[in-house]
Image: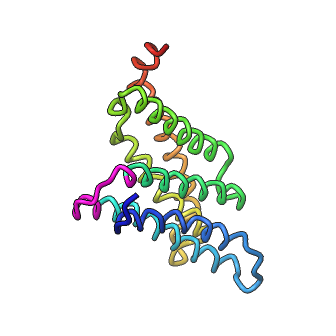
């Protein structure tokens, strides 16, 4: 593994995960829920921004690496899955949404791994519907973490709930897209 700025940002994104969980679950009576919501939201947003920044830097600085290409999506999935489990614990997202999104992440990661071992990883390369799914997740999750009206008027919980359902729909759509792309290879497998 090469230590470069893009990989360091990816590692930092992964290190934010236990901090995010601790903000909400650490038994500290000095932090009220409003403060926890604000801190947790900003931690998630900062981590999500590093997802874009590390990829941009890797390309811009010519520091794209096989390890970075492996670690980046792992960090993304861990961040989203941890946030969903946290939101489930806080009763801010339904179990069905969490199971759809987390289940898809596991299934498609396994599919990509299998396709790579079969020499056909390009068949399940990232598609625009997957990018839309990620965008919907990365917008809805901070709204659900914040959980209170923004500026006293923007109903973040309602908008976040609606968007997480959109993300779940896009999650299913993208899963079926990737399975359809992989189907010829799955059908012909031993």
Q: Residue furthest front?
A: 1
Residue 63 covered by magenta stretch:
yes
Look at the picture and state if 108 lies above or below 133: above
Q: Which residues are magenta?
A: 56-68
From the top left corner, tell me how far across and down residue 124 is, in percent: 38, 33
Could you tell me which residue is drawn at 77 percent across and 83 percent down? 29
Judge from the rendering whether residue 60 lies leftward or rightward of residue 119; answer left or right. Answer: left
* Number of numbered discs visible in the structure rendering: 0
148 or 95, nearer to the observer: 95
Judge from the rendering whether residue 63 lies leftward or rightward of residue 183; answer left or right. Answer: left
Judge from the rendering whether residue 161 lies leftward or rightward of residue 67; answer left or right. Answer: right
Could you tell me which residue is drawn at 49 percent across and 40 percent down? 171
Could you tell me which residue is drawn at 70 percent across and 81 percent down? 32
From the top left corner, tell me how far across and down residue 130 is, in percent: 40, 43
Look at the picture and state if 31 lies above or below 19: below
Secondary structure predominantly adopted by residues drawn in magenta: helix
From the top left corner, tell me how far across and down residue 155 is, in percent: 55, 66
Could you tell me which residue is drawn at 29 percent across and 60 percent down? 58
Residue 168 covered by magenta stretch:
no
Look at the picture and state if 39 lies above or below 91: below
Task: Write down the quadrant of residue 68 in the picture.
Answer: bottom left
From the top left corner, tell me how far across and down residue 24 is, in percent: 68, 70
Classify the position of the N terminus by image quarter: bottom left
Q: What's the image's color scheme? A: rainbow
């Amino acid at each position: 593994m090469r230590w470069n700025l893009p990989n360091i940002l990816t590692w930092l994104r992964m290190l934010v995960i236990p901090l995010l969980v601790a903000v909400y679950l650490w038994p500290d009576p000095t932090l009220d829920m409003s403060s926890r919501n604000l801190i947790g939201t900003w931690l998630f947003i900062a981590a999500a921004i590093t997802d874009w920044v590390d990829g941009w830097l890797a390309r811009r600085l010519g520091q794209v690496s096989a390890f970075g290409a492996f670690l980046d999506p792992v960090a993304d999935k861990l961040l989203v899955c941890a946030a969903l489990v946290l939101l489930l614990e806080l009763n801010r997202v339904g179990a069905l949404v969490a199971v759809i999104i987390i289940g898809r992440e596991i299934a498609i990661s396994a599919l990509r791994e299998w396709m790579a071992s079969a020499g056909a990883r390009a068949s399940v390369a990232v598609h625009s519907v997957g990018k839309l799914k990620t965008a919907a997740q990365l917008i809805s999750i901070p709204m659900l973490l914040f959980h209170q009206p923004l500026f006293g008027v923007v109903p973040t919980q309602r908008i976040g709930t609606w968007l997480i359902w959109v993300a779940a729909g896009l999650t299913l759509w993208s899963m079926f897209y990737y399975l359809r792309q992989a189907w010829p290879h799955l059908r012909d497998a031993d």
